[in-house]
Every structure is written in structure tokens, then in C-alpha cells.
Amino acid sequence: MLQFQGMIAEYERAQMLERSRRGKRHRAKAGEVSVLSGAPYGYRYVRKTSEAPARHEIDAAEAEVVRLVYNKYAVDA
């Protein structure tokens, strides 16, 4: 009985993961931003509202760090 319950639990977990992947793929194809697990460094995630879709905004302090790192390793190298 315990093995049967474990088998069903594994199947349900696989189904949930597949539905989650399908949902993320659908949102990505629709052009929505929320498919990422979080905003990339240098950006801030802004949730959707009734007036505007979800989006990423530049975080000025983090963006400056990104510029410094880029210049240090790509431009000045």
C-alpha cells in the first residue's frame, strides 16, 4: 500500500511540474515578463495592475554596478 501511495505521489508531482512548465511557456509566448523566477540584477520587477502589464524597471544603483563591472572586464581589458 505504501509503495502504491508513493507511485501516485510521484505521478501527481510530474503532472504539476508539466502544468507549471506549460503555463510558463504560454506566458513567455504571450510576451509576459513574469516567466522569470526573479528580476535580473540591475532591474526591479513591477507587478501588473489593471492599467499596466507587468514589467522590469531599471534599478539605478544596481545598474551602476553592472556598468562598472562591464567596463572593468569588457572595455578596459
Image (cartoon, rainbow, N blue to C red):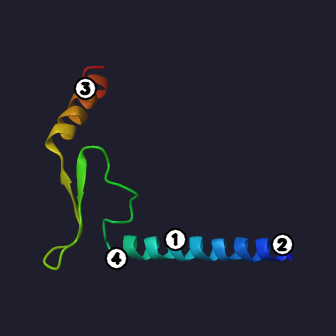
Q: Residue at x 39, y 65 (%)?
A: 35
**Which mark is in front, 2 or 3?**
2
**Which mark is in front, 2 or 1?**
2
Residue 28 picture location, percent across and down: 38, 70
Please name the residue that numbered disc 4 is placed on.
30
Question: Crowdedness of circle 2 by 10 Å Cα count: few (<14), some, many (20+)?
Answer: few
Name the image quarter holding the N terminus: bottom right
Closer to the camera in the image, 9 or 26: 9
- In the image, is residue 1 above or below residue 54? below
* Real-space Cα separation, disc 2 to disc 1, in angstroms: 29 Å
Please name the residue that numbered disc 1 is placed on.
21
* Real-space Cα separation, disc 4 to disc 2, in angstroms: 42 Å
**Which mark is in front, 4 or 2?**
2
Q: Earlier in the sequence, mark 2 or mark 3?
A: 2
At mark 2, the secondary structure is helix
Amino acid type assigned to the residue bearing label 4 in the image = Ala
Assess whether mark 4 and mark 3 are in contact (beta carbons under 8 angstroms).
no
At mark 1, the secondary structure is helix
At mark 3, the secondary structure is helix
- In the image, is residue 74 above or below residue 26? above
Residue 46 picture location, percent across and down: 21, 62
Q: Residue furthest bottom?
A: 50
* Real-space Cα separation, disc 3 to disc 1, in angstroms: 38 Å
Please name the residue that numbered disc 2 is placed on.
2
User: So how many labels did they put on this image?
Assistant: 4
Q: Residue at x 24, y 49 (%)?
A: 43
* Real-space Cα separation, disc 3 to disc 4, in angstroms: 36 Å
Q: Residue furthest front?
A: 1
Q: Which quadrant of the structure image shows residue 54?
A: bottom left
Residue 74 horizontal side relative to residue 59, left or right = right
Residue 75 is labelled as 3
Q: Earlier in the sequence, mark 1 or mark 4?
A: 1
